[in-house]
């Protein structure tokens, strides 16, 4: 979120981001390394260096971030590997899991970092969102 809110301005250093988000530097370094290796974040060297988004926030889908940081988001193994369970073809529960997965991915695929930042700004200004 911090990189989104600062997009187009100056690079942010790990310590500044960690302080703002109230997370440890070590943990954030791990997250940023994964985001950098996937091309979502880039680093700027030097005394005023730090990290920046590699593309505009409106072009980065939440699905890219989640799959980079978490891997496949399938809730149950049988959605990805049908050989995992011999009942896959006639399992009503699997159909529900599939619907949940599709709903989750639909939201993550259609929501960008800009969308998320807009919501955060509205909430900080005392606005409300209805789901």
Image: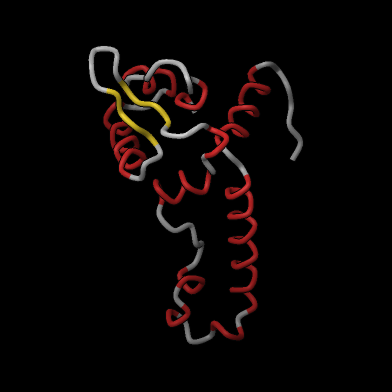
Q: Residue shown at 47%/71% (left/top)?
A: 80
Residue 127 or residue 60, whichever sits in front? 60
Q: From the viewer's perspective, is residue 110 above or below residue 2?
A: below
Placement of the C terminus among the 4 image quadrants: top right
Q: Measuring from the top left, give residue 39's x and y in whole percent.
A: 36, 41
Residue 7 is situated, as x and y percent measured from the top left of the image, at: 48, 23
Q: Which residue lies furthest to the left in this view?
A: 46
For this view, does 76 lie left or right of residue 15?
right
User: On the rendered structure, is 100 left or right of 1?
Assistant: right
Q: Quadrant of residue 104?
A: bottom right
Image coordinates of residue 125 in percent, x first then y, are 68, 16
Q: Residue at x 51, y 71 (%)?
A: 79
- The mark total stands at 0
- In this picture the colour scheme is secondary structure
Q: In this view, does 83 lie to the left or right of 88?
A: left
Q: In this view, does 99 lie above or below 38?
A: below
Q: Nearer the viewer, residue 54 or 122?
A: 54
Residue 8, image x and y in percent? 48, 20
Q: Find residue 19 and report its image quarter.
A: top left
Determine whether 72 is above or below 126 in the image: below
């Amino acid at each position: 979120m911090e990189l989104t809110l600062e997009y187009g301005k100056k690079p942010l250093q790990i310590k500044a981001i960690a302080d703002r988000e109230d997370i440890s530097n070590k943990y954030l370094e791990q997250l940023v390394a994964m985001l950098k290796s996937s091309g979502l974040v880039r680093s700027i060297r030097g005394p005023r260096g730090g990290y920046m988004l590699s593309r505009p926030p409106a072009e980065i889908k939440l699905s890219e971030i989640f799959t980079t940081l978490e891997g496949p988001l399938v809730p149950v193994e049988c959605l990805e590997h049908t050989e995992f369970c011999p009942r896959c073809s006639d399992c009503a529960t699997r159909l529900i899991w599939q619907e949940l997965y599709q709903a989750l991915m639909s939201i993550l695929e259609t929501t960008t970092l800009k969308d998320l930042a807009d919501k955060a700004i509205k909430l900080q200004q005392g606005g409300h969102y209805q789901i």
